[in-house]
Image (cartoon, coloured by chain):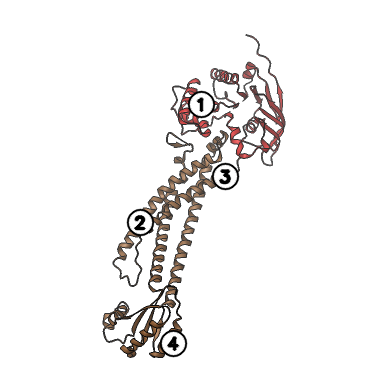
Chain colours: A brown, B red
C-alpha cells in the first residue's frame, strides 16, 4: 500500500484534510473534559452512597437530651432487629457539623442543638424509619429519625442526571466527529477520483483503496486526538490544583484516580477508532457504486 | 478470451453509443480498433476492461459472463487486463518506478520482487536512466513508454491500448508497435485503438471497425513485400 513512504493517493495535497486534526483535537478536548466530569460526579455519588446508606441519625430535642433518655433510646435501638451498632455523637462533633453553614460564632453562642445518635444498620437489613421514630418518640417525646434518604436520593438523582447528560453530550461529540470525517473522506474521494479509478481498473479491491483512506484518517485523528488529550489533561490538572484550595465540605474533590486517568485515554483512542471506521465505511459505500 | 454478444451501450437516457456489437477475440490475437472520432472506440475499450457495464447484451471475459459475475470477482479479472490510456494517466507524485510498480502492489507482490521486475522492464523500454524521474519531467514518448510498462508489468493476458502512438513521432510509434508485436508473440492478446491508418496497413492485423456505433470486423490488406 505504501511505497517509498507514500500512499498511492497524494493526501498531502488534499486541502480538505488540513482541518480534520483541529476538529478532532477540539472534540477530544471537550469529550475528555465531559468524561472526566462524569467520572468525578460518579465518584461523588458513590462516596455519598457508601457513607450515608446503611446509617440513620436519631435526633433528640435539646431539652430532652438527658443521660436517661440516651440510655433508654440506645437500649431500644440495640434491641431493634437490623441495628448493628449505635454511637452517641459528642456535642462538640455535632456542633462542628454546623460550623460550615452557620459559622463558629453562631454555633458557640449557646444555640440549642439537638443531640444525635448515629445508628449503623447491618448490611441488607431494612428498618422503617417512620415506625422506628414512632417507637422512640413514645419513650422520649420529640425524638425523630433521619435516614438521609430523602435528600440523598434527590442528590443522587441529580448526579445521575448530570452523568447521563455528560454521556449524551459525549455521544453528540462522537456523532459530530463522524460527520466531519464523512465530509472529509467524501471530499478526498472527489479530489482523488482519477487515481481511484485507475487503481480500480488495475484490479484493486475496494478494501485496498479504503485501507488508504483509513490509514490517512488514523494519522490525522491520532495527531488531533493527542493534542486534544494533552490539552484536556492540562486543564484537569489545573482544576485539581485549584480544587485543593476549596473547602471540601461543599464541593466534591475534582481529582481522578490513576485508573480514571487511564480510562480517559478511551476518548482519544475512541476518536481514532471512530475516524478509521467512518473513513473505511464511507469509502466502501462510495466504491460499491463503481462497476 | 473476450466475446461480445449483441452489446448495446448508452450513457443515462442518451442515445445508444454502441449498437449490437458482436465479436470475439481468440487468445494470442492482435487487432486494431479503428473508427472516426466519436465512433465509440473509447467506450468499447471501457467495456472490454470492465470500467463500464453494458446496458444490454453479454460480455464474456476469460470465459466469465460479466453480467452474472459477482462484483468481488471482477478485480481478479481486471488484473489480467493491461490498459494503456490515451492520456497515459501516470500518477504525478510518483516516480517512473513507482508508477510501473503500482499494479504489482495492488496485486500484493513483495517489495523486492516488485523492485527488480520494474527496473528490468523500464530498462527494456529504454528508460533505464530515468527510473526515478517524475512524469512531469519526462517527454511525451517517455511517458508513453512508462504507461506501456505499467500496463504490461503484471503480464496481462489481454492488453488494450487507446491511441498509444497518438502523441509520439513516427520513429517512436514504430518502436512502440514492435514492442506490442513482441508482447503478442509472447502470448498476450492485443487490441490497439488508433487513427493511424498507415500503421494499420503496415502491420496487417485484423481490424475492428467502428462506424456510428456499429462494428464490423475486416482484415487489413497484407503488407506488400519489401
- Do the dots labelled 2 and 4 sit on one chain? yes
Image-based side of B201 in relation to A115, left or right: right
| Callout 2 touching callout 3 (CB < 8 Å) | no
| Residue positioned 69% across, 29% down in the render | B3
**How many neighbours does mark 3 have within 10 angstroms: few (below 14), some (14-19), or many (20 or more)?**
few
| Callout 3 touching callout 4 (CB < 8 Å) | no
Residue B146 image label: 1
- Classify mark 2: helix, strand or loop: helix
Distance of mark 3 from mark 4, alpha carbons?
73 Å
Residue A286 image label: 3
Task: Residue B90: tell me if it is visible.
Answer: no
The picture quadrant where one finds residue A155 is bottom left
Question: Measured along the vertical axis of the image, is residue B24 above or below residue A110?
Answer: above
Q: Check the picture and name the quadrant holding the N terminus of chain B.
A: top right
Residue A134 image label: 4
The picture quadrant where one finds residue B36 is top right
Q: Position of residue B168 (x, y in %)?
A: 54, 22
> Which of labels 2 and 3 is toward the front?
2
Q: Chain of mark 1?
A: B
| Callout 2 touching callout 4 (CB < 8 Å) | no
Question: Measured along the vertical axis of the image, is residue B61 above or below residue A289?
Answer: above
| Residue positioned 61% across, 37% down in the render | B73
Image-based side of A91 in relation to A195, left or right: left
> Which of labels 1 and 2 is toward the front?
2
| Residue positioned 67% across, 41% down in the render | B12
Which residue is at the front of the view, B176 or B68? B68
Q: Earlier in the sequence, mark 2 or mark 3?
A: 2
Residue A233 image label: 2
Distance of mark 3 from mark 1, alpha carbons?
30 Å
Amino acid at each position: 500500500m505504501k511505497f517509498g513512504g507514500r500512499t498511492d493517493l497524494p493526501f498531502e495535497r488534499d486541502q480538505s484534510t488540513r482541518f480534520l486534526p483541529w476538529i478532532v483535537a477540539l472534540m477530544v478536548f471537550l469529550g475528555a473534559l465531559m468524561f472526566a466530569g462524569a467520572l468525578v460526579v460518579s465518584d461523588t455519588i458513590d462516596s455519598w452512597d457508601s457513607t450515608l446508606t446503611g446509617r440513620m441519625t436519631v435526633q433528640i430535642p435539646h431539652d430532652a437530651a438527658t443521660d436517661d433518655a440516651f440510655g433508654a433510646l440506645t437500649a431500644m435501638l440495640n434491641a431493634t432487629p437490623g441495628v448493628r451498632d449505635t454511637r452517641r455523637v459528642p456535642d462538640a462533633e455535632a456542633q462542628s457539623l454546623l460550623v460550615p453553614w452557620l459559622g463558629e460564632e453562631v454555633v458557640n453562642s449557646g444555640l440549642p442543638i439537638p443531640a444525635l445518635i448515629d445508628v449503623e444498620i447491618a448490611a441488607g437489613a431494612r428498618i422503617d424509619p417512620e415506625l422506628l421514630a414512632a417507637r422512640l418518640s413514645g419513650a422520649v417525646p420529640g425524638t425523630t429519625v433521619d435516614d438521609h434518604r430523602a435528600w440523598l436520593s434527590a442528590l443522587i438523582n441529580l448526579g445521575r442526571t448530570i452523568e447521563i447528560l455528560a454521556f449524551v453530550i459525549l455521544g453528540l461529540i462522537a456523532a459530530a466527529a463522524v460527520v466531519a470525517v464523512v465530509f472529509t473522506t467524501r471530499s478526498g474521494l472527489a479530489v482523488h477520483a482519477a487515481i481511484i479509478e485507475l487503481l480500480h481498473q488495475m484490479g484493486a479491491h475496494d478494501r485496498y483503496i479504503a485501507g488508504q483512506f483509513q490509514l490517512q484518517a488514523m494519522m490525522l485523528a491520532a495527531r488531533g486526538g493527542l493534542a486534544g488529550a494533552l490539552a484536556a489533561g492540562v486543564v484537569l490538572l489545573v482544576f485539581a490544583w485549584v480544587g485543593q484550595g476549596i473547602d471540601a465540605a461543599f464541593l466534591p474533590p475534582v481529582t481522578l484516580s490513576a485508573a480514571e486517568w487511564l480510562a480517559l485515554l478511551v476518548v482519544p483512542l475512541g476518536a481514532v477508532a471512530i475516524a478509521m471506521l467512518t473513513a473505511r465505511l464511507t469509502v466502501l459505500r462510495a466504491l460499491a457504486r463503481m462497476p | 478470451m473476450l466475446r461480445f454478444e449483441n452489446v448495446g451501450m448508452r450513457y443515462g437516457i442518451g442515445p445508444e453509443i454502441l449498437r449490437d456489437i458482436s465479436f470475439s477475440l481468440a487468445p494470442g490475437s492482435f487487432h486494431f480498433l479503428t473508427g472516426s472520432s466519436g465512433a465509440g472506440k473509447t467506450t468499447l475499450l471501457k467495456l472490454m476492461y470492465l470500467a463500464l457495464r453494458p446496458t444490454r447484451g453479454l460480455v464474456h471475459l476469460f470465459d466469465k459472463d460479466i453480467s452474472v459475475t459477482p462484483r468481488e470477482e471482477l478485480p481478479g479479472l481486471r488484473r489480467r487486463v493491461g490498459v494503456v490510456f490515451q492520456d497515459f494517466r501516470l500518477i504525478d507524485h510518483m516516480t517512473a518506478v513507482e508508477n510501473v510498480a503500482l499494479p504489482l502492489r495492488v496485486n500484493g507482490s513483495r517489495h523486492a520482487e516488485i523492485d527488480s521486475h520494474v527496473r528490468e522492464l523500464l530498462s527494456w523500454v529504454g528508460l533505464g536512466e530515468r527510473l526515478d524521474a517524475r512524469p512531469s519531467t519526462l517527454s511525451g514518448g517517455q511517458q508513453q513508454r512508462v504507461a506501456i510498462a505499467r500496463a504490461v508489468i503484471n503480464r496481462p493476458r489481454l492488453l488494450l491500448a487507446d491511441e498509444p502512438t497518438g502523441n509520439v513521432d513516427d520513429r517512436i510509434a514504430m518502436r512502440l508497435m514492435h514492442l506490442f508485436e513482441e508482447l503478442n508473440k509472447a502470448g498476450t492478446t492485443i487490441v490497439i485503438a488508433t487513427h493511424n491508418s498507415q500503421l494499420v496497413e503496415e502491420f496487417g492485423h485484423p481490424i475492428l471497425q467502428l462506424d456510428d456505433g456499429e462494428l464490423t470486423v475486416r482484415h487489413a490488406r497484407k503488407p506488400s513485400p519489401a
